[in-house]
Amino acid sequence: MFEGLRKPVDLIVIVVTLLTYGCPVQAIVHAFSLDERTVADWRDRAGAHCQNVHQAIVEQGQLDLMHVQADEIRVKGCKMMAWMGLAMMVSTRLWLGGVVQLSRDRSLADRLMFQVRRSAQAMLPLLVLTDGWSAYPNSIRRAFREKIKQNSGVGRACLQVWPQWHIGTVIKRTQNKRVVQITRKMTHGVIAQAEKLLLLSHGGSVPPHGFHRALEWNVPGTVGQLDA
């Protein structure tokens, strides 16, 4: 991150922190008498460094996730509209992955779920809660599969989904920007086992729309700097 940079480390940390919380590049340039290209370079360095740290620490297949919530939100950037998909481990409030795309299609859900898969221990019980977007169930099936040999000896292995995975769907109906109705249903799995995972992860103490509200609070400050 700091290799080859001549400016003081404290200044770089301050600039990257301001960028993370959505401060415009032009304001930083005028406040600290920096070149706009310098600020952009620090932003890109910080983004690449954070991605490497996340892959080295989180995406190592060591987490017993139990309960994951995934959601996406449409954000407005500079001369662009984009979709941000994020997934969170409910028991620890750890952000497992994030994806930014110009379109909201199958690849967005696939990329997000494969990030979650790289963080999870294989074959453990897992509950994934999503909104009503129809792309999620099939993306989860594609991500949470393992190669298993049906017969001993010579032969090819086939992909099989995890035996203890569950998909819950929470659909919100809003009126005047207020949630007036919440519909919950099981898309896949057993309700009793899903409720057990919900209790173990302390997910029942959080409103079902709390994850989306977290996105709405955290995203607006950073949509102008999607790289960071």
Image (cartoon, helix red, strand yellow):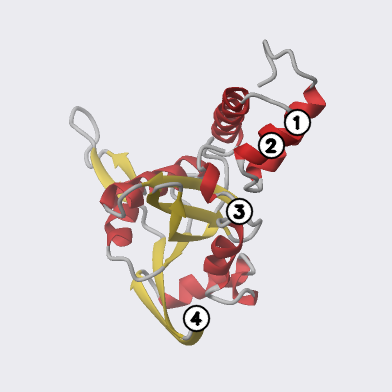
Picture residue at 78% right of the left edge, 23% below the top: 9
Picture residue at 56% right of the left edge, 57% below the top: 220
Q: Name the kind of residue labelled 4 in the image.
A: Lys
Q: Is residue 83 above or below residue 181?
A: above
Q: Secondary structure at mark 1?
A: helix
In primary-sequence order, the first of circles 3 and 1 is: 1
Tell us which disc is closer to us: 3 or 1. 1
Find residue 205 and report its horizontal and vertical position in percent: 65, 76
User: Is the residue marked by circle 1 packed among few (<14), some (14-19), or many (20+) residues within 10 Å?
Assistant: few
Q: Name the kind of residue labelled 2 in the image.
A: Ile
Q: Quadrant of the N terminus?
A: top right
Give the residue number, with chain letter if any, for mark 3: 221
Q: Nearer the viewer, residue 224 or 215?
A: 224
Disc 2/disc 3 C-alpha distance (Å): 15 Å
Q: Name the kind of residue labelled 3 in the image.
A: Gly
Give the residue number, with chain letter if any, for mark 2: 28
Give the residue number, with chain letter if any, for mark 4: 177
Residue 227 appears left or right of 102: right
Tell me whether the residue at label 2 lies in contact with that at label 1, contact meaning CB atoms closer than 8 angstroms.
yes
Disc 4/disc 3 C-alpha distance (Å): 20 Å
User: Is the residue marked by circle 4 packed among few (<14), some (14-19), or many (20+) residues within 10 Å?
Assistant: few
Disc 4/disc 1 C-alpha distance (Å): 39 Å
